[in-house]
Image (cartoon, grey):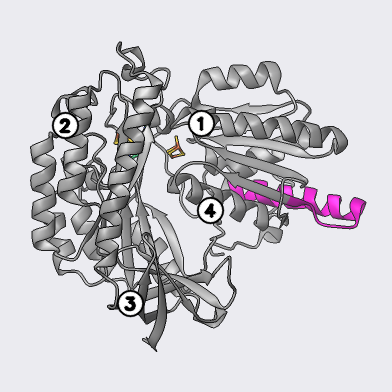
């Protein structure tokens, strides 16, 4: 963990400071007092469990929550049988919500037997007024509810939750605030996500994210660089730059800066060996970025370029601002500049009004591009988005049949692409001991392929050369060639 401040030096008998992040450190010190009392009374430290739903943004946010809980003295628990449970929720598709409702039912039963336990909910789902109404009405055992815009206030809200009866609810509609320098506890010692921007301004017609994450806000380049320098000093070799549309980074800064310019600065940070980013919206992907990717030896040979649909008509309805031809020529341009790049994508099947012809266009793009992997989603109606009001929702059986056809094609192409790597020697960042077989370690190539090979825990976090011996479709078995 970094950004450590000695909480014991903070005068908690005085009024809380008004400026941030000092105010949050003050409340962390207050919460630490509470933790000490708990320890005295129970003869043990309280423990917490976080469960993250959704994307890498949420995963990074959960590291912030963990950082604060550990700072105040909580220890981690391995399951929901804990003193404090927090769900960081996602609402991008209906099934993300359903998972949360399901698990809350289980938590309620557990809490009845352990009444001292606290339950907190945060994240994207909490930004939806219907969700809050439902929680207020039928889930009164939840102790703390906050949203995406005020996550930096977690310590303050936690203190409120410790010191008052009833549910603490704090949801903001939007914000223009970015609070820096709070504690963060990373999941991995050698790699880290780094937020470069928050929110989204694109309003793709099916998508709830702009409504729950607010307007686009870029972090200042100097704050990003400072964070990455600290991470590098702490042993991080790979960073994943995070934003809903990283290609529009910097447009609203006081001194505007492009994403490509930011990348060039990040490349200069000593110790950082790999740079990844997501997500790239095709409409904003610049020639400047392609050029920087072509000449960089730190930016990974992987681009996630969501297609969503191959039909120009549907793309227009989706408000994506590109058509099939533009997407395909962009792919061609990228492949020309970075020949060995791996391309991955997101595709939605069954957007309202999608005909068999539209779907065939999607299949055609998949065949032409040959993605190294693709996330395929069944369209999910999100209340409040323009697409939810569209007529012609596609029947479930039709969608399911198209989805299966698409998945088959995606997998066929991906296996074909992976197979071509068999026999080659590649640089691999070792990430963890293999879950199924402890004599193996698992690592990732620059192009994001996964390889399992004989190794030990000392190799974790190191970049080594591995021969890819056997292709298993989406992953490889390999053998260590040499340590780099
Ligand atoms: N900002 C990223 C995507 C964030 S959401 C981008 O624009 O690429 C991740 C993916 O979820 C999207 O790319 C899309 O494919 C999918 N998705 C979003 N809303 C959806 C919905 N209503 N139904 C099904 N899939 C959806
Ligand atoms: Fe959603 Fe589109 Fe924004 Fe991505 S770019 S988060 S799909 S609105
Ligand atoms: Fe889900 Fe929110 Fe991410 S809705 S996909 S967790 S931005």
Side of 227 relative to 31 (left or right): left
Percent position (x, y) of residue 416? 25, 59
Query: Can you say which quadrant of the picture contains the N terminus?
Result: bottom right
Precedes in sequence: disc 1 or disc 4: 1
Side of 358 relative to 165 (left or right): left
Viewer-nearest residue: 145 or 467:
467
Which residue does the numbered mark 1 point to in the structure image?
95
Q: Do tag 1 and tag 4 residues touch (Cβ < 8 Å)? A: no
Please give the label number shown on residue 321: 2
**Residue at the spot 79% in from the left edge and 28% down from the top edge:** 165
SS at circle 4: loop
**Residue at the spot 16% in from the left edge and 40% down from the top edge:** 364
Which residue does the numbered mark 3 point to in the structure image?
427
Percent position (x, y) of residue 318? 24, 26
Gap in angstroms between the C-alphas marked 2 and 3: 37 Å
Precedes in sequence: disc 3 or disc 1: 1
- Frontmost of labels 3 and 4 is 3
Which residue does the numbered mark 4 point to in the structure image?
182
Q: On the image, which quarter does residue 325 sit in?
A: top left
| Numbered range of the magenta stretch | 24-47
Residue 251 higher or lower than 296, as above or below: above
Gap in angstroms between the C-alphas marked 1 and 4: 32 Å
- Report if residue 271 is visible in the image: no
Q: Tell me the chief SS of the magenta region.
A: helix
Query: Which quarter holds ligand 2?
Result: top left
**Residue at the spot 51% in from the left edge and 31% down from the top edge:** 95
């Amino acid at each position: 963990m970094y950004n450590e401040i000695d909480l014991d030096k903070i005068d908690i008998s005085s009024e809380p400071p008004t400026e941030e992040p000092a105010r949050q450190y003050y409340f962390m010190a207050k919460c630490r007092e509470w933790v000490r009392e708990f320890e005295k009374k129970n003869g043990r430290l309280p423990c917490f469990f976080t469960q993250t739903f959704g994307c890498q943004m949420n995963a990074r946010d959960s590291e912030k929550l963990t950082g604060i809980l550990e700072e105040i003295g909580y220890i981690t628990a391995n399951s929901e049988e804990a003193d404090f449970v927090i769900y960081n929720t996602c609402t991008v598709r209906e099934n993300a919500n359903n998972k949360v409702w399901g698990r809350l039912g289980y938590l309620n039963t557990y809490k009845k037997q352990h009444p001292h336990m606290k339950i907190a909910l945060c994240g994207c789902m909490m930004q939806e007024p219907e969700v809050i109404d439902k929680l207020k009405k039928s889930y009164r055992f939840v102790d703390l509810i906050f949203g995406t815009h005020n996550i930096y206030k977690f310590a303050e809200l936690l203190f409120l939750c410790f010191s008052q009866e009833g549910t603490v609810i704090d949801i903001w509609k939007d914000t223009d605030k970015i609070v820096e320098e709070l504690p963060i506890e990373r999941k991995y010692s050698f790699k880290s996500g780094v937020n470069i921007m928050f929110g989204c301004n694109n309003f793709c017609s099916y998508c709830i994210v702009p409504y729950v994450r607010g307007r686009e806000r870029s972090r200042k380049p100097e704050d990003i660089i400072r964070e990455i320098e600290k991470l590098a000093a702490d042993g991080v070799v790979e960073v994943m730059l995070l934003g809903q549309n990283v290609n529009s980074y910097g447009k609203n800064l006081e001194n505007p800066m492009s994403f490509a310019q930011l990348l060039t600065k990040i490349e200069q940070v000593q110790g950082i060996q790999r740079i990844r980013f997501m997500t790239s919206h095709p409409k904003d992907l610049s020639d400047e970025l392609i050029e920087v990717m072509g000449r960089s030896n730190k930016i990974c040979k992987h681009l996630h370029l969501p297609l969503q649909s191959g039909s120009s008509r549907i793309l227009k309805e989706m408000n994506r601002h590109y058509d099939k031809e533009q997407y395909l020529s962009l792919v061609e341009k990228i492949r020309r500049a970075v020949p060995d790049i791996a391309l991955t994508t997101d595709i939605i099947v069954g957007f309202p009004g999608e005909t068999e012809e539209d779907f065939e266009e999607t299949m055609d793009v998949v065949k032409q591009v040959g993605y190294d992997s693709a996330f395929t989603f069944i369209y999910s109606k999100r209340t409040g988005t323009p697409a939810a009001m569209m007529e012609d929702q596609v029947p479930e059986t039709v969608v399911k049949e198209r989805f299966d056809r698409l998945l088959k094609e995606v997998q066929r192409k991906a296996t074909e692409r992976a197979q071509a790597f068999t026999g080659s020697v590649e640089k691999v960042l070792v990430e963890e001991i293999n879950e199924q077989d402890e004599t193996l370690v698992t690592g990732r190539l620059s192009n994001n392929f996964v390889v399992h090979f004989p190794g030990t825990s000392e190799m974790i976090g190191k970049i080594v050369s591995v021969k890819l011996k056997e292709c298993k479709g989406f992953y490889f078995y390999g053998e260590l060639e040499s340590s780099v």
